[in-house]
Each structure stands twice: as structure tokens, then as C-alpha cells.
Image (cartoon, rainbow, N blue to C red):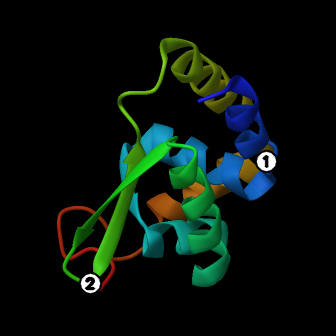
Amino acid sequence: MEPESYFKALADLTRLRILRLLILEGELCVCELTHALGEIQPKISRHLALLKEVALVLDERRGQWVYYRLNPALPGWVGEVLAAAAQGLGAHKRFAADHRALKAMPDRPGGVRCA
């Protein structure tokens, strides 16, 4: 994968918001992302498809839900860029609000997710 593909994928606010949450949480289903970002499922799915296309994320279907996580085979420099971005964006109101909304989502870890 060429570096410009990664940076093009990062050049969208919704995708940055998704990636930061995945970095913080490790794995999330689409319903968790729609809740946290306050966006509709088709929009989130479209952005996830692009992130998957450039191999930034991997998906796994479990029953009716699809879970996403960062691709563990990313080159080291990509992981460093994503980690630095996630840390730096944490002070930004919108990104911090996304994480708070996710944490406040009912029926999260420990029980049935996305019910």
C-alpha cells in the first residue's frame, strides 16, 4: 500500500473519528460507532468500507453484527501515525465527546452488545 492511500483515508473527519475510537477500544461493532458518532448506519458503513479497502481495518461477522478493528499487520510507521493522531485528537471536543457517548451507550460490554 502506498503512503498516499493511508493519508487520503485519514483526510476525512468521520474516518478519523472512527479510527480514534477503534484505537481506544480495540474493536467495535457498527452499532457502537453509529451511537458514538451520532451518524446513520449507511454513512458509517460507507466509511468503514473505505478503511477496509485500504487495509486500515479488518472486519469479522458474528451473527448479525459486524465488528471492526485496526489491521494488526499495518506497517509500523502507520501505527505510529495513528497512535499520535489518536493522542493529539483526544483534546479536541468532538473526539472526546465521541468517546464519552460510546462509554454511555447502554448494553455495552459485559452483556449483549448491540441489542
Category of crowding for the residue at label 1, using alpha-carbon neighbours closer than 10 angstroms: few (below 14), some (14–19), many (at least 20)? few
Q: Could you say whether the residue bearing mark 2 is in a helix, strand or loop?
A: loop
Q: State left or right for residue 110 relative to residue 30.
A: left
Q: Name the spot of residue 1 as percent of width and height, x first.
A: 58, 30
Q: Amino acid at mark 1?
A: Lys
Q: Name the spot of residue 109 as percent of width and height, x first.
A: 25, 62
Mark 2 sits on what residue? 64
The residue at the point 76 percent across, 30 percent down is 4
In the foreground, 40 or 56: 56
Q: Amino acid at mark 2?
A: Gln
What label sits on residue 93 in the rendered view? Answer: 1
| Mark pair 1, 2: CA separation | 33 Å
Residue 6 higher or lower than 60, as above or below:
above
- What number of labels is visible? 2
Residue 32 higher or lower than 58, as above or below:
below
The residue at the point 68 percent across, 53 percent down is 15
Q: Name the spot of residue 6 as percent of width and height, x first.
A: 67, 34
| Quarter of the rendering containing residue 84 | top right
The residue at the point 71 percent across, 37 percent down is 5
Q: Name the spot of residue 58 as percent of width and height, x first.
A: 39, 50
Mark 1 or mark 2: which is in front?
2
| Quarter of the rendering containing residue 100 | bottom right
